[in-house]
Amino acid sequence: MHIDIITVLPELIQSPFEHSILKRAQQKGLVSVNLINLRDYATNKHKNIDDYCYGGGAGMVMMIEPIANCIDDLKSKTVYDEIIYMTPDGDTLNQKMANTYSTLNNILVLCGHYKGIDERIREIYITKEISIGDYVLSGGELAAAVFCDSVIRLIPGVLNDETSALSDSFQDDLLSPPVYTRPADFKGYKVPDVLLSGHAGEIEKWRFEQAINRTKSKRPDLLKEN
Ligand code: ADE
């Protein structure tokens, strides 16, 4: 998979890709990520990428020309499966969406700032609009990092033990069961006996029951969806 990310703040989004699983995914050649500085496509001598909002009102709007020039340039080199705009009014990201996006070859992600982008960019170029939740961030960069992390970890081969992604919370509309590690007894707080029993079948059954109970009590909406 290849991901291009258009941003006015490349430094802000760089770090998540330089550590841990996302770093290893790139080292293994399973994904490549390229940050594109939108300011490189600014059309005036001041390198402006935002302007006043037509009709008045507070806040600046990201101008159409720099974004259009940037996307046109990228599209001349790459055929994208999706051109995604990170925005609080997009479809709320969930595990099913992450699964779907993890099967794509080329994704372009546009990070917004200020009051948003000129609406015509959405009409002309954007194929998907994604929100990471019902709250407003200062810009799309952190949202893009969250989106990319959720997708990249699902690419086959990225996680050492692929089943660990399959047993993630939400993967089958269930929250994950509790997990424990040593010591088996911490000041009287004990690990459930079944996990120490060595009975694979019993352990699997216990984990499934725990996942159901946890989902029922914390996120009953997930069970209702089916
Ligand atoms: N940009 C600002 N807030 C956002 C959100 N909640 N999701 C995606 N992009 C955003």
Image: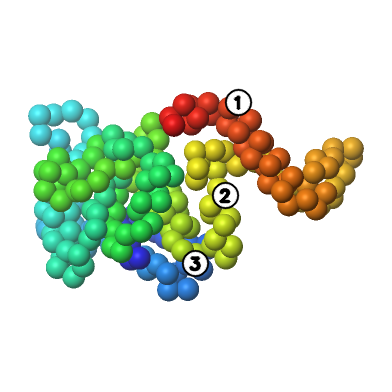
Distance between mark 3 and mark 2 Cα atoms: 15 Å
Residue at horizontal 31 percent and vertical 38 percent from the top: 91
Q: Quadrant of residue 134?
A: top left
First reached walking from the N terminus: tag 3 or tag 2: 3
Provide the secondary structure element on which disc 1 rests: helix
Question: Foreground residue, 6 or 202?
Answer: 202
Residue at 89% from the left image edge and 40% from the top image edge: 187
Element assignment for label 2 = loop
Q: Is residue 134 above or below residue 171?
A: above
Q: Amino acid at mark 1?
A: Ser
Is residue 34 toward the left or the right of residue 28 in the image?
Answer: left
Residue 193, placed above or below residue 221: below
Q: Quadrant of the C terminus?
A: top left
- Residue 17 can be seen in this image: no
Mark 2 lies on residue: 167
Give the labeled residue for mark 1. Answer: 217
The quarter holding residue 58 reads: top left
The three-letter amino acid code for the residue at tag 3 is: Gly
Q: Is residue 161 left or right of residue 96?
A: right
Which sits in the foreground, 118 or 148?
148
Task: Give left or right: position of 175 versus 183.
Answer: left
- Secondary structure of the residue carrying numbered label 3: loop
* Residue placed under numbered mark 3 in the picture: 157
Residue 127 versus residue 14 in the image, above or below: above
Lower sequence index among marks 1 and 2? 2
Q: Residue at x 44, y 61 (%)?
A: 155
Looking at the rendered image, the quarter that the N terminus falls into is bottom left
In depth, the one of 166 and 203 nearer the eye is: 203
